[in-house]
Amino acid sequence: MAQLCWQCGASSDPATSLDSPSLRDFHRLLTSNDVPLDSEIPFIRDVVSDGQKQVDALEAAIAQLTRKRDEIAENIRQRRAILSPIRRVPPELVCEILVLSLSSDDDGEMANEPPWYLGHICRFWRHCVLAYPALWSSITIPSSSSSDPHPLISMIEVQLVQSADAPLRVCWSPCDDRNTADPGSVDLVLAHSSRWRTLLLDIRCKSHVPVSLDWLRPANGHLLALETFEVTGSRGFRVDIPDIFSTTPSLRNVFLTNWTFEVYTSVPAISWVQITRYSGTFDPDSQIEIVEAATNLVSCALGFPSWDDNVAHGPPLVLPRLRRLHLETPAFFHRLKAPLLEELICHNWSGTINGLPEILPFVQQSSCTLKKLVLSGCDVDFNLITILQGLPSLTHLVIENDGLDSTPAHIALFDALENGLCPNLVCLACAVGSKINTHQFFAMARSRFQMEPLSARLVQLRLFGRWAYDVEHCPPHIVAEIRAMCDEGFDVSFVDSHEEDILKGRAVFP
């Protein structure tokens, strides 16, 4: 057997080398199609066999070098990890980051699960998780089940112990036909009702069986730390709220409907004068009573399941501290005054009332300096130009309708914006229709980005689709214009649904 080089695997036997004299004698066979002699065949086979051994040896050497390289690379990775900045992050900062991960809600469901899985990452994280009470303070009460006791009771017990004295966030969402909270779990959590800071009821079940909240009654008189009470969920449910909130001195935030104003509750007994943030869908008389009492509101959203035009006439309702107003029925503008209002969201889900003519008289009557205007479902007509002419302080404008197209009203709006309408505008966000005159629209946008003086220039342009398409299906001609403006250095983008909700104010509802 020929000897092979330990470095490259080549044969050291000159008789079987590919360059040996014996092989050169067969040059004619390599350069022709001649049939080899019988005496030549064994020697050729030996040469081929030796060559294959060289290939095998080289492949083995490569595999050995590859393994050696991987071992060294892994050693480098492990030693580099010792220098990782994450090791220098203080435990309290790690815990704050983990708390933010628990409060994420990407799929529309309540995602405030206990942090059991976070302790599986590493020993350091496990120590942080176990030593930080706030990570265990979000507790979800299960609905009643046939099993006794409920399988989650032991986990709730652990959470209550690990949360120590931290304020609690208590959540309950009825599921399917089980519209009653699990009694065993309720007893555990009610024992700590003095620590409740947030109470969230997410009514999303498909059953039309009335949702019972009687399990909350034992908390009456103990909710001294409660700051936020929220009811959200699906359309078509009416929830009767027991009288347990009349003695909640820390209560400041009351949200009794979803952002489409389709959740209905009974009017709870609350000391409304202490409430600063409120949303609810009630009949006009009930809303008037609430607004009259809630004189310290900073943010509110008012929905009406029905409307009586007579309610629009009456003494003004003054909200002296209101900064943010989300209103479903424009006719209610006639009753309101908000001298400090900065943000107005006009929400027209019914599509029957434009609402635009009501905005400017309301702003002028309130003598407020409006900075952000969101028009949701309102038609773009020539009234909009008149309104914007009367709002020189506006810095953010969001238009959500069927999409800006090439109608005369849209063209007039583009011309007015290009000629300096809303001189302090820094952010324009709007739905764009598939028939929009992109050349004229983006020419207007370019002129606003380049406007003089610098303080009057547009800073951001945000586009989104209205029903017809989303960010993944943006028409190619609009994509091309966006890319061209980005290449020119302008801040322009077609946003996804989450960013769109932030622009429209849904993410911070009310």
Image (tube, rainbow, N blue to C red):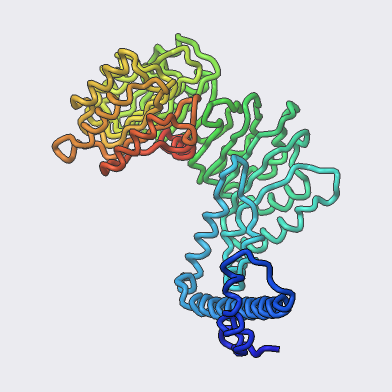
- The residue depicted at 57 percent of the width and 79 percent of the height is 24
| Total numbered circles | 0
Residue 383 in the image: above or below residue 471: above
Q: Hey, which residue is sitting farthest left in the picture?
A: 453
Residue 144 in the image: above or below residue 3: above
Residue 147 in the image: above or below residue 207: below
Residue 251: % across, % down? 51, 43
Which quadrant of the figure has residue 401? top left
Q: Nearer the viewer, residue 359 or 157?
A: 359
- The residue depicted at 49 percent of the width and 67 percent of the height is 92
Q: Is residue 223 visible?
A: yes
Residue 387 in the image: above or below residue 121: above
Q: Which of 405 and 69 is in front in this view?
A: 69
- The residue depicted at 72 percent of the width and 30 percent of the height is 206
Q: Can residue 321 be seen in this view?
A: no
Q: Nearer the viewer, residue 510 or 491?
A: 491
274 on left or right of 178: left
Quadrant where the N terminus sits is bottom right
Residue 98: % across, % down? 54, 59
Q: Nearer the viewer, residue 313 or 429?
A: 429
